[in-house]
Image (tube, rainbow, N blue to C red):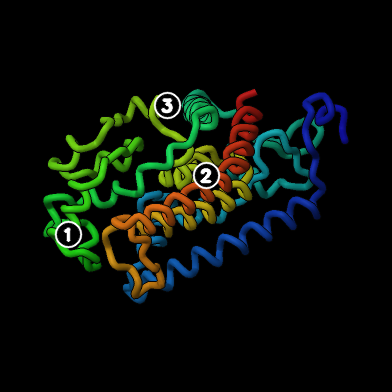
Amino acid sequence: MSETAASRGETVLAAAEWRARQSAHQARVAAMVEDRRARALRGEKDPVEDFLFTYYPFRLSARTRWSPGAGVALAEAEELLADSRFGTGPDGLTRLRPPDAAAAGRLRFSLELCRAVALRPAFLGCFGLHEWAMVYGRAAERRHSEWPLRLGVEGTDAVVRAMPVRCTHYDAFRFFTPDAKPLNKLSPTLDGRIANEQPGCVHVTMDLYKWTMKAQPWVEAELAADALELAAEARAVDMRASPYDFSAVGLAPIRIETPEGRAEYEAAQRALTKKAEPVRARLMEALARALA
């Protein structure tokens, strides 16, 4: 390790090591991206994949691009200098430049939000009703109109009326129908995310992918890929617990309108919460390193 790298407390990767990591990451994500491209060309809908590639509208090239994250110096990495966020020091090693003011602001918000979520107890009593509230009273205008409702229009509305609606996630709540919003215990806002979001929420788990991508390239790309895989798992639970019948694409329903279904959903929610903990912890470490 060079004196400059040592004084910075950096990890130095030899050319063979970082190129192997780059190739492995690109191959891993390319498989997901190519599946997406092929399905789009065939005009096939998929409620999990469509969400991950449209709700999180990052370019396909950005999803496959590799970065070591902050605090890592690379040997023989001049080809990365095409990205102006990388630079080469007097020691000849390539590393990321510090984030500018705008990027640092995004990183600080992500870190503050992750820390708040990590310190909050998980709430596991929402039973995925947010998707039901998005069609309540407006089933004929539902977003996923190509998929049938398992219980029909009236049956769907009856479930929303019969169960307490307790959504804590702003980006879910904002899609509630006007008739459903007053039924929610909270009125989450964009500015209130740090005060409201909690680790039991499947959307908060999915959003770990959003925050890792928004923090690129100062957070290692492998973490973003891990978060993407976790988001896919969480989205599958989200859709299985929804009012729609997605059995045609292999998503067996979690029937949250029944006691057995609610127990199944809570167990899945608890498992996702545990899986999200180390991903969130790694993200907080990476964000803090980038802001140091």
Tell which of 121 and 264 is nearer to you.
264
* Residue at image mark 1: 155
Q: Write down the residue under mark 3.
A: 194
Q: Residue at x 22, y 52 (%)?
A: 159
Work out which residue is located at the far front of the displayed protein and give it. Answer: 259
Q: Real-space Cα distance between discs 3 and 2?
A: 17 Å
Could you tell me which secondary element the residue under label 3 belongs to?
helix
The disc, 2 or 1, on the residue closer to the chain's N-terminal end is 1
The amino acid beneath tag 1 is Gly
From this view, report whether residue 67 is shown above or below residue 155.
above
Indicate the quadrant where residue 43 lies.
bottom left
Residue 208, horizontal then vertical, whole percent:
50, 42
- Under mark 3, the amino acid is Ile
Label of residue 198 in the image? none
User: Residue 65: x and y, percent?
Assistant: 57, 52
Q: Residues within 10 Å of mark 1 (few under 14, many from 20)?
A: some
Give the quadrant of the C terminus.
Answer: top right
Residue 121 in percent (x, y) is at: 50, 32
